[in-house]
Image: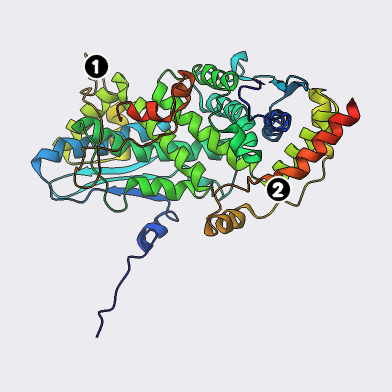
């Protein structure tokens, strides 16, 4: 998965949040992370994970294989979802080709019908959004983004150890949380510039310290 | 004196709320039994039966006579506790929902067009089932659409559609079959040829008084459309499926 500065609106913080989104989703879903590489100067990042799908670990055409594919699709979508959650305007119209091509290639292992794959991808994207919007997940994304500004190359074990050590808010009753949110008609969490400022400041400070 | 205004209650009727607590699922089709729709109705019931049988969902009975079109089965997903996030629970729920959706999809494939759906039916039942597992309305909608497409792909398979057609004919002849009878019929089935759905476009007929066809509405491009470099307006210009 790579994301480059494809348009002017994408900042370094966006790239870091994008890669952190992939990594946190993989960690939450039990997908083994390979490594994260970020090139701070050119604002480009890459996150790799170990795919279980093509190894013949699951019976061909089984529902367990479908669920494994679905997990990886959620991980692949989580980058752009986190980026949109952080800075919506910067991600508007952005097409992360590497992620999308990965989704298509993964889904094509069990399905050939493109309409079905489109709907499957939409469903995986919704699952990624629901996962990223959880307060504890988002706290981990923010913490990992700052850590990536400090250490632009992190290996899987280092990411696992770091995420396990992040202090997160207590998990709320998910059913009540969704009811309340829908009652207030707040579909997405806030995207305003003042909400982004603390994380952007922390990333800027961490990358300055590194220099 | 001003007439008291009665607003429609928002949400499923009480009867439907109770349905998710039951262990069986009954699909009934209510409309004037016109001969024109007999084939589509039997396909609806037979599609439920064949897919439920393939997924290992226990079937209670299927009825198709002059007045009743009923299909009853026991839900596999209700064997799991609410909020059980295990792989098995998710698979069972998805299979139940796909079997539920196969009725409407099979009917649409048989007719070549889909009915506008009024009121509460199989599809709202699938949403009720999913709410045992997912709370986010966006995720439920996405999952629902994915299940419908899986149902379509399953039914468009020639071997499955042939079995559905044959079971539908059998059901019209004998009028009522229980679970073991359906299982035995499908197990003994030998076919010399394969039948496929007509291939007619499956689309909702336009209603000019309600839907304007003059305005091009931006639509978010799908995964494959985005990879082909299409934007929202180009995606909207694509033929509606």
Q: Is residue B96 left or right of residue A184?
A: left
Secondary structure under badge 1? loop
Which one is in front, B172 or B107? B107
Quadrant position of residue B173? top left
Q: Which residue is mark 2?
A: A194
Q: Is residue A137 left or right of residue A99?
A: right
Residue in the foreground of this view, choosing between A93 and B150 = A93
- Compared to residue A93, the image places residue B16 above or below, namely below
Checking the image for residue A80, the label placed there is: none
Residue closest to the far bottom: B1
In the image shown, does B198 or B82 lie closer to the viewer?
B198
Q: Is residue A68 above or below residue B80?
A: above
Residue pointed to by mark 1: B194
Is residue B57 in view from this perspective? no
Image coordinates of residue B15 in percent, x first then y, are 36, 61
Q: Quadrant of the N terminus of chain A?
A: top right
CA gap, disc 2 to disc 1?
Answer: 63 Å
The quarter holding residue B126 reads top left
Chain at tag 1:
B
Residue B55 in the figure: left or right of residue B174: right
Chain letter of disc 2?
A: A
> Residue A182 at what x, y percent from top left?
53, 55
Place of residue A47 in the rendered image (x, y in percent of width and height, measured from the top left):
71, 22
Q: For the residues tagged 2 and 1, is the chain the same?
A: no
Residue ID at (19%, 42%)? B208
């Amino acid at each position: 998965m790579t994301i480059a500065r494809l348009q002017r609106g994408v900042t370094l913080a966006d790239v870091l949040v994008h890669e952190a989104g992939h990594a946190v989703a993989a960690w939450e879903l039990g997908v083994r992370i390979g490594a994260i590489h970020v090139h701070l100067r050119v604002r480009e990042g890459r996150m790799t994970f170990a795919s279980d799908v093509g190894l013949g670990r699951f019976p061909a055409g089984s529902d367990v294989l479908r669920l494994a594919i679905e997990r990886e699709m959620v991980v692949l979508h989580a980058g752009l979802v986190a980026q949109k959650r952080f800075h919506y305007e910067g991600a508007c119209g952005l097409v992360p080709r590497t992620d999308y091509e990965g989704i298509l290639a993964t889904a094509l292992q069990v399905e050939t019908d493109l309409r079905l794959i489109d709907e499957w991808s939409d469903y995986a994207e919704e699952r990624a959004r629901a996962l990223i919007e959880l307060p504890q997940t988002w706290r981990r994304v923010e913490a990992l983004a700052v850590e990536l500004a400090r250490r632009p190359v992190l290996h899987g074990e280092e990411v696992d150890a770091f995420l396990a050590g992040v202090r997160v808010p207590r998990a709320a009753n998910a059913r009540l949380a969704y009811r309340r949110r829908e009652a207030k008609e707040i579909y997405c969490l806030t995207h305003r510039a003042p909400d982004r400022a603390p994380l952007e400041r922390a990333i800027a400070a961490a990358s300055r310290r590194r220099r | 004196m001003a007439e008291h205004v009665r607003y429609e209650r928002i949400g499923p009727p009480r009867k439907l709320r109770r349905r998710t607590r039951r262990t069986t699922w009954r699909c009934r089709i209510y409309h004037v039994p016109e001969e024109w729709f007999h084939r589509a109705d039997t396909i609806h019931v037979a599609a439920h039966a064949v897919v439920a049988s393939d997924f290992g969902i226990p079937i209670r009975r299927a009825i198709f006579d002059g007045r009743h079109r009923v299909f009853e089965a026991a839900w596999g997903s209700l064997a799991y506790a609410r909020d059980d996030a295990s792989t098995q629970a998710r698979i069972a729920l998805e299979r139940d929902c796909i079997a539920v959706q196969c009725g409407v999809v099979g009917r649409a494939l048989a007719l070549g067009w889909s009915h506008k759906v009024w009121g509460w039916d199989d599809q709202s039942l699938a949403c009720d089932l999913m709410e045992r597992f997912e709370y986010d309305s966006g995720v439920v909608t996405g999952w629902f659409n994915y299940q419908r497409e899986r149902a379509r792909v399953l039914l468009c398979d020639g071997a499955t559609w042939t079995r559905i057609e044959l079971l539908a004919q059998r059901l019209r002849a004998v009028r009522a079959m229980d679970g073991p009878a359906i299982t035995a019929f499908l197990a003994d089935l030998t076919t010399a040829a394969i039948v496929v759905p007509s291939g007619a476009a499956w689309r909702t007929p336009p209603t000019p008084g309600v839907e304007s066809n003059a305005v091009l509405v931006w639509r978010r491009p799908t995964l494959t459309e985005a990879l082909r470099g299409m934007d929202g307006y180009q995606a909207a210009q694509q033929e509606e499926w």
